[in-house]
Amino acid sequence: MERLRARPYGRGRLMPLLRYLLGRLALAVPQLLGIALLAFALLKLIPGDPAPMMLGPLATQEAVDKLRAEMGLDQTLPRQFGAYLGRLVQGDLGRSWQTTNPVLRDIAERLPATLELVTLSLLVALAIGVPLGLAAGRNPDGPTARVADVFTTGVGALPDFWLALVLIFVFYSLLGVAPPPIGRLDIAVLPPPPVTGSHVVDALLARDIGTFRAAARQLVLPVATLGVLYAVPLLTMTRATVARLNTSDFIRFAEAKGLTPARIACHALRNALPTLVTVFGALYSTLVGSVVLVEVVFAWGGIGQYAVGAVLNADINASLGFILVAAVVSLLVHLAVDLTAMLLDPRQRPQ
């Protein structure tokens, strides 16, 4: 019987794990350097000069040239990239000419909004996709499998912004049961004192039930949009994994022992967890960098909406800052996923 048991790390097993962690962190440096180089080159291809955009249409050529020199835009691209890396090593992502704030501060203010939206959306996706995929995988010819087929076919091809607009039209414009898509809080509600950056969590910490309800209402439609859409890959992966496990020895042994279907499903889910964690991590890192359109539709104010404004206005520092922060979040999520998979499946632990 194949069973995966999580065992605690002893002293002799800790060193391989530490070497693995150090190797992953060391590998992250050239990865980030390559991402920065590629993003810098691509952003420089975007038409538009930030200097005249900052000074306005009435600026003289002399003023434009002076600002370009101050910003280092009169230098060659390799020198500009070298100067950017020099600032980056010191933790300086530059200054956004749109907001006139340091990019690091802008992103620090907006990243919690994106993480809150992505985290809650994927929890909803898990709540929909895993039970449905588990039931469909255990009984491929049952009614739940047909429901899963309809759900996968009907929802899988929908664009996220289109579904967001449909939900707004139905639940806000027609039925009037959802709040307007104007961001994370109604303009009449004051945000809670910032602790985590999540309005829902911060309102609970401040015991402000009114703000908590207002923040939760604003979350419903964007979370439903992403949660329903991203339930599809989780459903598909769960269903395929459980269907594969149905033919394994430990499932047949469990059936021969006369275990209930619920207990057999629990055994199958336990063995499917490493795969699900990997898919969850991949979706999480993807969503942090690609939740742009949903943030724009709901005026969410996260880093996705910030990135859109930066690209449209040739704000190079802000655009690069978004890409690098999204890359760092992605690397950290993948590292956390790999460590979690090692805890769930001892065969994946470094030797």
Image: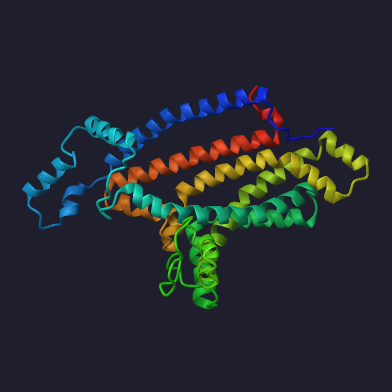
Query: Is any atom of residue 126 visible in this view?
Result: yes
Residue 79, position as x, y percentages in the image: 22, 31
Q: Quadrant of the N terminus?
A: top right
Where is residue 143, by image quadrant? bottom right
| Image-based side of 123 in relation to 309, left or right | right
Residue drawn where x is 65% and y is 36% of the image: 341
Is 124 located above or below residue 254 in the figure?
A: below
Is 155 located above or below residue 276 in the figure?
A: below
Residue drawn where x is 6% and y is 47% of the image: 62
Residue lying at the far right in this picture: please name it: 257
Residues 246 and 140: in front is 246
Residue 302, position as x, y percentages in the image: 42, 56
Query: Is any atom of residue 159 visible in this view?
Result: no
Where is residue 323, by image quadrant? top left
How many labels sit on residues? 0
Residue drawn where x is 52% and y is 25% of the image: 23
Residue 333, position as x, y percentages in the image: 53, 41
| Colouring of the image | rainbow
Residue drawn where x is 28% and y is 55% of the image: 99
| Image-based side of 317 in relation to 345, left or right | left
Is 72 located above or below residue 185 in the figure?
A: above
| Image-based side of 35 in relation to 159, left or right | left
| Image-based side of 164 in relation to 53, left or right | right
Residue 314, position as x, y percentages in the image: 26, 48
Q: Quadrant of the C terminus?
A: top right
